[in-house]
Image: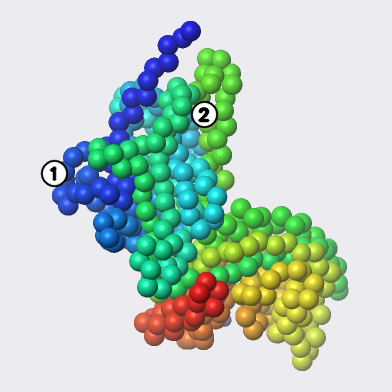
Amino acid sequence: MEERRPPQFRLRAIAILLGGICCDSGDGPAGCTADNNAIDPVAQTPSDRVEVGGTQIWRVRWDNPVVGAQYELPSIGYAIRQGYAWHYNKFDLELDLDDADPAHRLYTWPSFAGTYGDDEDMFQFESHGMKLEPMVDGEALSSIATASGIHDAWNGPELLLEDPLGNTEGRFQLDPAVGLVPLRVVVLHGGPLTAPGFFGPALSAGWLSHNSAELLIDDRWEGTKLTNTMAPYFPDFVETEWTHRPGTGQVASAPIAGGGRHMQPDRVFDQCDVQFRMLSYHTCQVPPDILYDSQCLGSLGQTGHANTVRNYVAENCDVPSDVAKVIFVGSLAGSNCFDGTLNGAQVRNDVLITNMFAGKTTLAHELGHLVGLNHTKTSGNLMAPGSGIVLDEEECSTANAVAHTMQAAYWD
Ligand SMILES: [Zn+2]
């Protein structure tokens, strides 16, 4: 029998996974140098490490923190990133999450473009889409999510990564300063609609997929591993295809139908410690004249149609009415209507976003209304015309208070 080479992975800085690690400077044991190790190397996840009754916990102000660690790659393996695909050989590395999405689930992979040769090297690996829930009032050890690193080498057994102190788990909590707004996403489909001067194409149930919605609201993205069974790689050669996230600029974006992009509302509302959580995802087939508004009904117009959509969904789409809905529709008035088109609307406790005319800040803007914000004329403001994303202190104070109220109504 062929001798299996034992795992030789050395962990230099996995402190992000580790609640118990103690290191205040770079002088500690290997693995203790990354005192800021819960920070996303791309997006700078904001967090503080606190100690509660001897337990080290990362208090995070993103409800979907990026968690990851630096890993020292041994000489026996390599990984190459080509486009959004990573190609691995001879090892496997994942994070096992246990969070508000109650199942443990494995997430991969590294974070930045690069090529790793046969030499030892350092690289980041990370996981997107951990879901934190609000702490229970007065219970400092409540709502803790955990992450553990797992690796196997040469297709060997999976092993837990541990730091030099023997810690194998990182612990995370949502900072109480954050107000978490629960949402249910509803994607309407149907059509086509042909009316004088207006055409609305048929939309399939998947025009905004569950994955896209999770990416947009909860920053969940991952690579899907593909195992190459061809000699001479079998069984160790692994390929990963990213589900997405094309480009992470200052404000990350997610694809929407029609080639546009929405900014992730969480990244827009970081400035107010307000975050949004998708509790569930629904699709609903509706008549073409619900999906699209081509009527330009004078006194009713866009607003009338928005109400019609909102009421239709409430009565026909079998979506719980306990929290706000984000309803993705085709249009809210045809492009030739005298009162123009709406990119989105907030109707009572729900938000409508159009497929045809939404801009990148439409979703965040309408969610701004949902958390109590009114329009302003200040240029560059999220609530002003245009595509600004700034919110001032007073707006943040309002949004945060409303978000906490909405959070309490669902979670308390
Ligand atoms: Zn508005």
Image coordinates of residue 93 in percent, x first then y, are 43, 35
Residue at the (84%, 69%) spot, across then down:
287
Q: Residue 219 carries which label?
A: none
Q: What element does badge 2 sit on?
A: strand
Image coordinates of residue 280 in percent, x first then y, are 63, 62
Q: Mark 2 points at which residue?
A: 238
Q: Distance between the residues labelled 2 and 1?
A: 36 Å
- Ligand 1 visible in quadrant: bottom right
The answer to whether residue 399 is seen in the rendering is: no
Decide if residue 281 is on the left or right side of residue 170.
right
- Name the mark nearer the viewer: 2 or 1: 1
Give the image quarter of residue 5.
top left
Image coordinates of residue 87 in percent, x first then y, are 48, 30
Name the residue type under label 2.
Val
Image coordinates of residue 119 in percent, x first then y, are 31, 24
Neighbour tally class for label 2: few under 14, some 14-19, many 20 plus, Cα within 10 Å: many
Give the image quarter of residue 310.
bottom right
Residue at the (60%, 55%) spot, across then down:
212
Decide if residue 270 is on the left or right side of residue 223.
left
| Residue 391 in the image: above or below residue 254 | below
Residue at the (46%, 44%) spot, across then down:
96
Which sits earlier in the primary sequence, circle 2 or circle 1? 1
> 352 and 181: which one is in front?
181
Q: Mark 1 points at which residue?
A: 27
Residue at the (21%, 38%) spot, across then down:
30
Name the residue type under label 1.
Asp
Q: What element does badge 1 sit on?
A: loop
> Ligand 1: does it lie within 8 Å of the C-beta at label 1?
no
